[in-house]
């Protein structure tokens, strides 16, 4: 029964509006980020172009991207009281759990595909079909800069990409899960959807004020604005987010009768 419900939710999520939104995130946003850096920059490798694409405006809107992939579907069902009519067919807990799982799956998948397209674009499409970006040979003082996760480059560009892409994907899943849980206990959906964005930017601001910017979400999810840090530093804000998720989960399961459905 639960597997059937997951499959049903999976099919419901794939509609024209969602697909267009997902294509915008996967294809258009990386191309928009690429446009201002296509000329006037010195790069030593396609990986640097990949990093520059992801180091532009994408970090500023990252929490927004995470929550718009699937949660508008859930909000629409809340607004239309659709969930109430599903109770005779499946338990409410199973229904909500299936929503949470599908939310995590689609959010992770679309964010991963956005990074994958960015990587394929700079590695194969831009050099062989466009050739706009100019590359320089590293020599003397002109050396590519290392950033966090560059530790994986010694195993190859693809290993670096998959390690980094999985990391960004996990963060996107956590941010969207926070909003999903909040939507179950807060009457104002706008607040529930805004909290991840506020957490993200307030954390960045406070980390900067305290002089520990290396622990900010901006510098741990998109670590292209600071020098290379030890990999363990990225886990500091992530652990904080996991704690928030666990607290929210406990609040949600203890207040099942008050769910906003």
Image (cartoon, rainbow, N blue to C red):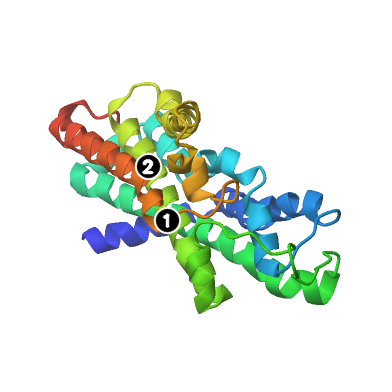
Residue 32 pos. (x, y %): 74, 50
Q: Foreground residue, 187 or 46?
A: 46
User: Looking at the image, is 14 positioned above or below residue 189?
Assistant: below
Mark 2 vs mark 1, CA separation in Å? 14 Å
Q: Foreground residue, 188 or 112?
A: 112
User: Looking at the image, is 71 positioned above or below residue 78?
Assistant: below
Q: Which residue is mark 2?
A: 237
* Tag 2 and tag 1, C-beta contact below 8 Å: no
Is 141 placed left or right of 7 in the picture?
A: right
Q: Would you call the spot at circle 2 few (<14 residues within 10 Å), some (14-19), or many (20 or more)?
A: many
Q: Would you call the spot at circle 1 few (<14 residues within 10 Å), some (14-19), or many (20 or more)?
A: few
Residue 166 pos. (x, y %): 44, 62
**First in sequence: mark 2 or mark 1?**
1
Residue sitting at 33 percent across and 48 percent down?
Answer: 99
Residue sitting at 24 percent across and 30 percent down?
Answer: 259
Which residue ends up furthest to the top in the rendered image? 188
Q: Foreground residue, 86 or 242?
A: 242
User: Looking at the image, is 40 positioned above or below residue 157?
Assistant: above
Is 121 placed left or right of 129 in the picture?
A: left
Residue 157 seen: yes
Q: Secondary structure at mark 1?
A: loop
Residue 8 pos. (x, y %): 36, 58
């Amino acid at each position: 029964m639960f597997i059937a419900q997951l499959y049903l939710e999976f099919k419901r999520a794939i509609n024209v509006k969602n697909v267009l939104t997902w294509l915008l995130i996967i294809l258009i946003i990386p191309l928009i980020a690429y446009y201002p850096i296509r000329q006037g920059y010195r790069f030593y490798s396609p990986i640097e172009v990949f990093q520059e694409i992801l180091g532009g405006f994408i970090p500023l809107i990252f929490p927004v991207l995470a929550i718009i992939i699937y949660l508008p579907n859930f909000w629409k069902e809340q607004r239309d009281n659709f969930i109430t009519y599903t109770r005779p067919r499946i338990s409410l807990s199973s229904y909500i759990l299936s929503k949470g799982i599908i939310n995590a799956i689609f959010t992770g998948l679309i964010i991963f595909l956005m990074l994958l397209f960015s990587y394929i674009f700079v590695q194969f499409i831009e050099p062989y079909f466009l050739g706009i970006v100019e590359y320089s040979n590293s020599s003397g003082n002109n050396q590519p800069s290392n950033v966090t996760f560059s530790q994986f480059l010694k195993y190859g560009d693809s290993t670096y990409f998959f390690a980094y892409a999985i990391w960004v994907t996990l963060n996107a899943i956590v941010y969207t899960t926070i909003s999903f849980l909040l939507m179950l206990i807060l009457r104002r959906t706008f607040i529930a959807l805004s909290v991840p964005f506020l957490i993200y930017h307030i954390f960045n601001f406070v980390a900067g004020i305290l002089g520990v910017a290396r622990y900010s979400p901006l510098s741990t999810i998109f670590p292209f604005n600071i020098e290379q840090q030890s990999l363990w530093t990225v886990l500091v804000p992530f652990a904080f987010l996991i704690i928030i998720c666990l607290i929210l989960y406990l609040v949600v399961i203890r207040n099942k009768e008050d769910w906003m459905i």
